[in-house]
Structures are given as C-alpha cells and as structure tokens.
Amino acid sequence: MNIDNSLKHTPFHARTAPLVLGATWRRWSGYAVASSYDWLHDREYAAIRNAAALIDVSPLHKYQVSGRDAARLLDRIITRNVMKMQVGQVLYTPWCDARGKVIDDGTVSRLGEQAYRLTSAEPTFRFLQQNAVSLQVQIEETTERLGALALQGPLSRAVLNQVAEQSLDTLRYFRVAGSRIAGVDVEISRTGYTGDLGYEIWVPAAQAMAVWDALMTKGTDYGITPAGIWALDVARIEAGLLMADVDYHSSHRALIEDQQSSPFELSLDWAVNLEKEAFNGKRALKAEKERGIAWRFVGLEVEWDSFEALYKSVNLSAALPMIAWRSSTPVYRQGRQIGYASSGVWSPLLKKYLALAHIRAPHYALDTEVEFEVTVEHRRKRARAWVRKTPFFDPPRKKA
Amino acid sequence: MSHRSDAIIIGGGHNGLVAAAYLARAGKKVQVLERRPVIGGAAVSERIFPGFTFSVFSYVVSLLRPEIIRDLDLPRHGLHILPLESTVTPLPNGDYLAGWGDADLSRRELYRHSPHDADAMIEFGRLMYHMAQAARPLLGTIPPDPTSLSPGDLKGMLRLGRHFRSLGAEKFHALYKLMTMSSADYLDEWFEFGPLKATKSASGIIGTFLGPRSPGSAYVLLHHYMGEIDGAFRAWGFARGGNGSVSQAIAAAAQSFGTQIATQASVKQLLVQGGRATGVVLENGDEYHAPIVISGLDPRRTFLDLVESKELPSEVLDRVRRFRFRGSSGKVNLALSELPQFTCMPGIGPQHRGAFSISPSVEYLERAYDDAKYGEYSRKPYMDIVFPSMIDPNMAPPGKHVASIFVQYVPYHLNGGWTPPKREAFGDAVIDTLAEYAPNLKSAILHRQVLTPLEIEQTLGLSEGNIFQGELALQQLFFLRPAAPWTQYNTPIKGYYQCGSGTHPGGGVMGAGGRNAALKILGELS
C-alpha cells in the first residue's frame, strides 16, 4: 500500500484545480479547497450578490440518518423540533452537550418518511452513535460519497432552471427536493451560507463532474463564476451567519469553559425550542434562560469617520480589510472591555466595515455605542462602532 | 589523594548532571563522579561500530522538563531537538496504521480504519491534554508525606488537595481511572480499532513488568503522554547527535557553572560519621569529601550497595529490598547498509523519519507479556523502531543507516539465567519478527548489538536492568517512591540525598528528580 500524504480532494477537484491561479489553497476539514480562484476574490464575491456563484462545499460533514427512530435520534440531539418536520423540509440548528454548550451547528433535511440528512462542521459520526443507544436507526457518513455545490446569487434560480429537470420556481426557502441534472439524480435544497437567493446541490461523488460541467456550460449566459472561501466569507458576514471554529468553539474542542458558548450566547434563541421533548442540554438551557444570558453574538458597524480619523492622524488613508479577518479583536465601552469581535470585513456592497462580536450583558442592546480596537501603524487605537441588527444585508429575494 | 567540595554527585547520568548544574548555578562547588569512561548514564551516544553513532540505551527525548531547558539554557550548550512526528504500525494483513504529525492527515488515515475512532481521537486528545496538565504540576513537586503533621507536609497536602479539587469532577474521575485501570481497558472505553488501541497501550507497558491488560498500566500511558503533549517545546523528538547530546548539554551547562566531572571514578562506599555523610571513597581508594552527597543511582545501589547496612534502619532496608525493578526491556542496535523497506509501505519515505511500532493488537502485546510472565523473552515482542540516521544524517556514514529497536518483553530473570548464546537467540527473535514486516532487513545488517536487562545492569549499573530505576507502578509512585518516608530526595543519613529516576517523578529523560533534589537541598541550606 502506498502512502498518500496529500490533503483530500473534493469530487470537483479536477475541475476546480486548473482554475486556481495563485495557489491559494486552504484546508477545510482535511480537504484542499480554493480560497479564491482569481488572484483576487472581488469578482467572485460580486457574482454572489449580482449573478450566480458556484462554490464547492463538499467538505461539509454529511450523515444519512434513517430507520424507524431516525427522527427520535435527531430530535434528542438538536434544539429544534424534528417531530414536526415535513418531508422536504430543512432546518438550520445548533446542538448542545448536556451542559447546554454548543457542540456544532448545521442543517437537518428530511429526505423521506424515515430518512434525514445532517450536515455539520465537525465530525459527528461518533456523537450520533453515542446518542443512538437503544434506538433503531442507521447512521452512515456520506461526506465522501456526496459532493455538494452551493449555487448562490440572484441568478441562481435562472441557471438551475436551465439544467434541472424540475423547475425551481416552487421550491420554497429551506426546502429540499429531488431532481436530475445532466442525467444525474441530485437533491436541490434552497439553502446556503450567503444570505442571498441560493441553492445547494447534493450529488453522488462519482457523477459530480457532469453536474459541474452542466452548470458551468448553461450558466455562462448568466455570469456563473466559481467562487472560493474568501468570497463566501464576505457574504456570510454580511448575512450575520456564524462560523464554527471562528466565531465559536465546539464544546468538544474547547479547552476551558470560557471558550464554550450556549446557543443563547450565540443569539440563536430562535433555533432553541424549550417546549419540545427532552433533548441534549434542555435542562441547562432552561436554567440559563431563567438566569439571564451573559453574552450575545451581535453585529457591529464601525463608524467610518472615527475609523478614517485614526489613519488620517498618521497621514494615511483608511486601510480596509477586503479579506475577512478571523482573529479576536477587543471591544470596549467607556474604556472597559465588554467583549470581542471574532470576524470582520469591509462590505463592498454596503460600503461599511462590519464585524461579528460577542458582547457581554448589558452592552449588547441595539445601537449601543462601543469602541472597536484597530491597529494603525503598530499602535492600538479605538474607533467608534455600534451594535447593529443582523443580517446586515437581507434581500427580499432570499425568501421570495 | 583527597578532594574537597560542597557537594558530591554519585553517577553522571542526566539526573545527576541536572542536580550538579542547579547546585553549581547556586554557587556550590560540585564534584560529579562517574564510573564509566563516558557521562550520561542511560542517555549516551557511543560509536559502537566505526562510523556509526548510537543512542545506545534511551533513544528519544519526550519528557525533558521545559523548565530545565530554560533554567540551564540547554540550547546554548548544544541541545537541539529534532522532530520525530509519525508512528507507523504495520499490520499482519499487509496494511498499516499511521499517525502523522499533521492532524488532518492522521484523521484521514485513522478514518480509513474506523470513522468512530477518528472522531473519538479529537476528544481523547483533549482529555489527555487535561490529564497531562493535571499531572504535570506534580512532576515539579516534592512529594509531601501524607502521614506527617509537619507544616511543610501539611501545606504540601493542602496544595495537592486544592489542585485536585480545581480539576472539577469530570477531570478528576478521568484521572482516577487513569491511575487505576489497565491501559487496554482504558483505551477500550474510547476506541474500537485494535491496532490503534495496541499502539497506544504500548506506551503503558514500556519499562514495566506489566501487560496492557494489567491494572496500573494506564498510568504509565499518561506518564508518556506528558511529553507528547508539550507541543510548545516540541519535547517529543530526537536529540541531534543522539541522546548522549542531552547529557553533554547538561554537563556543559554544569561545567559552565564550575562543576568538576570525573569519569572512571567508581564510588565504592559512602563515608559516614555519626550518622552524617562526609564523602565517598572510590574503588581505587581515592577519597572525596563534602558535607552533601547525592546519589543519582537507583534505590538499591543508593541504600544497599553504597551504605553500610548498620547506618540504616532495618525497615528502610526492608522497603528498599522490596522495591521492584524487574527489568523487562531490551535494545537491539543495528548498523545498516540500507534502510529496511516495509512491505506495508514500500519504498523510502516520510515513514522512515518517524517510529515503527510492532503492536498489531492488544492480544499480541498480552501474549508477548505471557512469555515474560513465565520467565521467557517474547518470541513475538513489542518493538519501537526508529532510524536516527534519517533524522540526523551525522549518525551514520553517507548512504548507511542506524536503527534503534526498543524491545519488550525481555525479563531480567530469564529461566536458567542469561548466557551470550541466549542473548543472541533473543536478538534473532527480534530480527526474525521485524523481517516479517521488512524482508530486506537481514541482508542490510552490517553490525548488531543486543542488549538484555543483564547487559543494561552490567554496563550502566541499573539494578535488574530496569530503565526507570524501578517500576512505575502505583505502589512505587509519588510519596511511596522509592521508600516511605524517604521520598523527598533525602535519606536517613544526614547530608545523603538521592536524585535518580528511582525518586519522584520517575523515569524517562526528564531530569525532574535531579532538579527537585537540588532545589530541596538549596532550600535546606538557605
């Protein structure tokens, strides 16, 4: 047996690899994926908001959960109600450990009467197994068997209608349906990580290339553009969507308690159903809610004038982060640190410097004025910023 | 001839040298006396065959305390630790299990064998991080006597109690399990893939006369994890020039502070006057005098060989007599004309820059132990193999290589006793077993050196050839190492101290015993 010491390749690698001009590869769950295809990601980002961007999201962990107790298994894991899901419905959801700390977030799709798919950022096979004790359920990891493409942007539906056997006109937001593209059986869900109109296409790995080719050929007239993670990262911050391992740490990986977050602390209250049957972390979450929530995950908008002034004072013009940063940046109020931003980027669309931040009670109320640390010429300064509602960008077409 | 100093160190092993360096750094005049022509004890590099350098005994650096590296500025004195990142376990079916330095690659490899285990590894790694963190402070602690009411001991127990309480229930329970379970049982709670459990549990048997299913072996596993964990210092590695260069660096640091080191100076006896150590006398009759004498030798030599029995209370003699050594490890060192190629991974590649582990299953290891239990060496032994010349090309002539094969089990007490033909038959068993996985091995061997616990004892003076100066068994750890109540580096004889691996926290090229002893003595002097 020969050793293969490379990162894993997605089913689309043969198509994507020649497009990566600047060797801008990065890791994602052990796979090599493109940060950008062009030298810059500008055009790729623009496609997300203006045309149709094609993003290889195959490294997502994917699990097929089926059998009599499939719903019961998922329902005891996630914080939303699986028992009420209809066939063809998709839920975004976090899931927690017994102490109510988030392990991961992802989606659950009901593909059939007793068939579900879970997507996750972290490996979840063992966790599903551990929770399946005495349940009649089959768990299969399909990460490698399934390729996944996100087709995102205002023209994504038009592109798909050119290639898919069924029209996408009736597929509602967070619904999934089977279809065929280039003779290949696929599932198309109206989901994504951009906060825009968009779809994700789930395709058997062995036939992945045919689907890519069909989309690229028919999509040309609609400006279809392969896009990498840098473009996706800008869009997801504009959409206020959090990223595992960047904006929070899985409680399975966190080394100390301070590194863990509850779903409330991540402002995912809307995705926590405390009325449903027992689920992992329910008791702790109830108690937390009664106790009051110590942190919130909020949007920050950095005020232009104060930001620019910091640069002006050293005779520079403002330096904007065109690639999203993922380091921790302190946030202050009246001189005291009240939290930290975990990702941020200049929004080319909104013309605003945006960040996503963890802010301690009681400073997280909307429009609270805070101070945001900026390093200007090796010196730490503070710009004014406001707590803002997310998503920063929420076009009606997303759900229309 | 008579010599006078502030402190005498008996034995120039790494712990003795560390103690010497710390004392000298504090301004003491220190004399080290080493029986052999080379310093380093079991951490020596020697040219046994022309052109080939071997870490003859200990062969990797995993546990050397970072505070010693810092305090003595060992890099300035020549310590250079090179990475040793991978472990490959060849399997009987022609496949392999590899652990690489990179987490993604390791996960990909393990996933091939067990998706469950690939997931479990994430949480297991985190738990062992916590466990090593929980145990690591104990390494630098002088064990308090739990039965004593002295303020120092009470304070020590209190500090210890606070430390354990601060762990929280979850970590405390995990630590309790590690202290009591067998490594195989402990790993069974986490993993399902046999070769993974076997390779990991092998860390739990090294240097002990325990099988992977023997209770207590999980602690030895943790003991070995503590070095592997300290990523910041990359303390899991290979010393440039072999493990002798660790000793050389410590000796150079000690000498820079004025320590005198004499080799071929075999200490015959401790000189005692009125219950107080006054110096030592060598085999050649030379006398060295100092108010402080520190033995880096193992407890049997320290208490029974160097001291007239009338100087020691009988219960101490009795406890030390019962201190268990039972050497179980051997070593085969090879000079090679070419690298062995493993059937499971043909060719020469990154695998040769890491370790190969012959540990295909827990059953395999347990059977290897069965042989030893009944007084035989393992016909199919556990082996940990590295090719130091692939990490440091200076270890062998260009194009040639050296192999270091750590072997277990090789009982000191062999049925009928060891003879040179038996030793070579044991060497043959090792080579035959390894050649099953790497067929070109036999034709590549230019020279071979076989070391059983008997050779280890005869060459280094380690009783029964135990590489840890006494087993790392629970009843021989912390405030019971080596013999209560003489576990705080002192002895019943005033001015006579101990600092070897036979003291807390035990074996491995760690240096903690030497450092703790020196700090204790300096504390008493101030």
Image: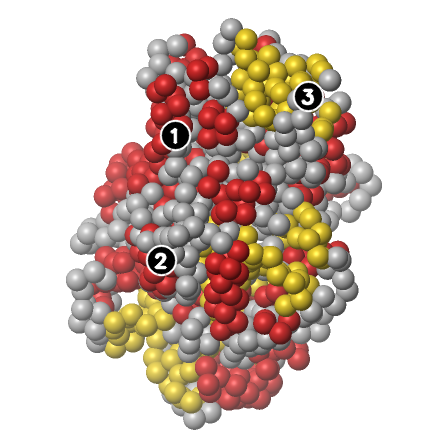
Chain letter, disc 2 residue: B
Chain letter, disc 3 residue: B
Question: Residue A96: where, in percent of width, then height?
Answer: 32, 51
Q: Residue at x 42, y 64 (%)?
A: B380
Identify the element where label 1 is drawn: helix
- Work out how far the residue at label 1 is from the one at label 2, CA to CA, in angstroms: 26 Å
User: In this figure, which residue is indicated by the disc labeled 3?
Assistant: B286
Residue type at numbered disc 2:
Asp
User: In this figure, which residue is indicated by the disc labeled 2?
Assistant: B371
Q: Nearer the viewer, residue A116 or A236?
A: A116
Confirm or deny contact between disc 1 and disc 2 (CB under 8 A): no
**Disc nearer the start of the sequence (3/1):** 3
Residue type at numbered disc 3:
Asp
User: In this figure, which residue is indicated by the disc labeled 1?
Assistant: B321
Identify the element where label 3 is drawn: loop
Question: Residue A368: where, in percent of width, then height?
Answer: 50, 37
